[in-house]
Image (cartoon, coloured by chain):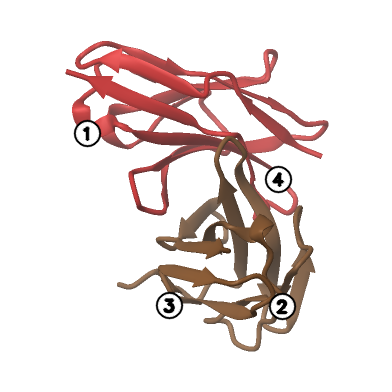
Chain colours: A red, B brown
Amino acid sequence: AQSVTQLDSQVPVFEEAPVELRCNYSSSVSVYLFWYVQYPNQGLQLLLKYLSGSTLVKGINGFEAEFNKSQTSFHLRKPSVHISDTAEYFCAVTKIQGAQKLVFGQGTRLTINP
Amino acid sequence: NAGVTQTPKFQVLKTGQSMTLQCAQDMNHEYMSWYRQDPGMGLRLIHYSVGAGITDQGEVPNGYNVSRSTTEDFPLRLLSAAPSQTSVYFCASFRDGTGELFFGEGSRLTVL
């Protein structure tokens, strides 16, 4: 079975500072990896995904993530955050066979302070 | 383009009552699923369906029932609500070949 651990439940940062949200996963088979974002009182939307190819993946709103197979990590980064990035971020993993059944991490609440 | 639509958005039940959360998608996706979101626990899969007439259990299926009579609709039934089912429920559909789930806006359920 797959599992995901998001290492920080809350991350406060100042506006225009860089941020990294950490995600480690566990799986005995090859996986797809995702980051989803949830703005207050909304559903989740896809931020970026790693299916194959380049290990550096770029997503929407200036976010990027790097797949590191040896460290089983998929950390999310942004070089300069904005107030509008305040949201909860979820890392998710699924095995390639049966890719529809995503397993989500516990979530990281990103708070941007002016 | 409506995407995934959930109703109701809010519901308060008393222990023992039953209800159905509705979910509809207009993207012709075969795969649909229900998750519940609880603080500090992320999203957990309740039930899923890989097509009309086919459903299966996820990680936390107890107390919930589903059916899939059409591609578009995937209702979630609570047979006898319990306070432990107080949560936010999300319906999602899956676009084949992309690995992407499309989520509804959620249904917040409180069981007293």
Asked if labels 3 and 4 touch by Cβ distance under 8 angstroms, the answer is: no
Q: Which residue is mark 2?
A: B79
Q: Are marks 1 and 3 on the same chain?
A: no
Task: Name the residue nearer the viewer: A107 or B94.
Answer: A107
Which of discs 2 and 1 lies nearer the camera? The answer is: 2
Question: Left or right of A30: which side holds A38?
Answer: left
The disc at residue A96 is 4
Q: Label 3 sits on what residue type? A: Asp
Q: Label 2 sits on what residue type? A: Leu
Q: Is residue A108 visible?
A: yes
Q: Are marks 2 and 3 on the same chain?
A: yes
Task: Please say if A14 is above or below B33.
Answer: above
- Callout 4 environment at 10 Å: few (<14), some (14 to 19), or many (20+)? some
Task: Please say if B99 is above or below B102.
Answer: above
Which of discs 2 and 3 lies nearer the camera? The answer is: 2
Which of discs 1 and 3 lies nearer the camera? The answer is: 1
Label 4 marks which chain's residue?
A
Asked if labels 3 and 1 touch by Cβ distance under 8 angstroms, the answer is: no
Q: Which residue is mark 3?
A: B26
- Image location of residue B87, percent across then percent down: 56, 55
Asked if labels 2 and 4 touch by Cβ distance under 8 angstroms, the answer is: no
The disc at residue A84 is 1
- Callout 1 environment at 10 Å: few (<14), some (14 to 19), or many (20+)? few
The disc at residue A9 is none
Disc 1 secondary structure class: helix
Q: In the image, what residue occupies the spot 53% across and 62% down?
A: B110
Disc 3 secondary structure class: loop
Cα distance between the residues tagged 1 and 4 = 33 Å
